Image: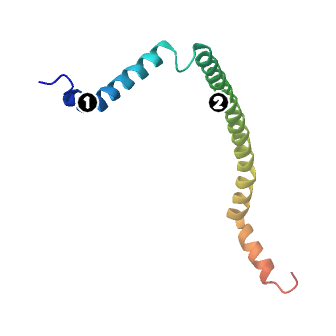
Amino acid sequence: MDALDLTGIWGLSPVAALIGVTVFLFLSLARGWVIPKSSHEREMASANKRGDEWKETAIDTRKLNSMLAKQNATLVEATKTPAEFFGTVMREGGARRAIQQEESPNG
């Protein structure tokens, strides 16, 4: 066997290079070589701040929805009185009177 016959090793080099790059990537990520710790902490603090803002917004929205529900309940109660009044008028002959007034020539 000739000392310069290294075809088997050169045939594996793309796979070995891929494995080496993959190992280096995971190692550099784990040790913080790719993303410095200060940058990571800054981004995490920013994400936490956004999360807190979203939480405050959700709480404010719930309060607003509660107030709107109370106002709507009040308005619904307020519409019951006229509806009952006009229902009573119509049941007691108000509908006939309205039709008779429309049919009369003098108005």
Residue 69 percent across, percent down from the top left: 68, 38
In the figure, is residue 66 to the left or right of 1? right
Quadrant (top left, top right, bottom left, bottom right) of the C terminus: bottom right
Which residue is painted at 19% across and 28% down in the image?
5
Taking the image as shown, residue 46 lies to the left or right of residue 3, namely right
Disc marking residue 58 = 2
How many labels, in total? 2
Residue at 75% from the left image edge and 53% from the top image edge: 82
**Element under label 2?**
helix
Amino acid at dot 2: Ala
The image quarter containing residue 85 is bottom right
- On the image, the x and y values in percent for residue 98 come to 77, 73
> In the image shown, does 94 or 56 lie closer to the viewer?
56
Residue ID for mark 1? 10
Return the residue nearer the eye: 20 or 57. Answer: 20
Give the quadrant of residue 27: top left
Q: Residue furthest right?
A: 106
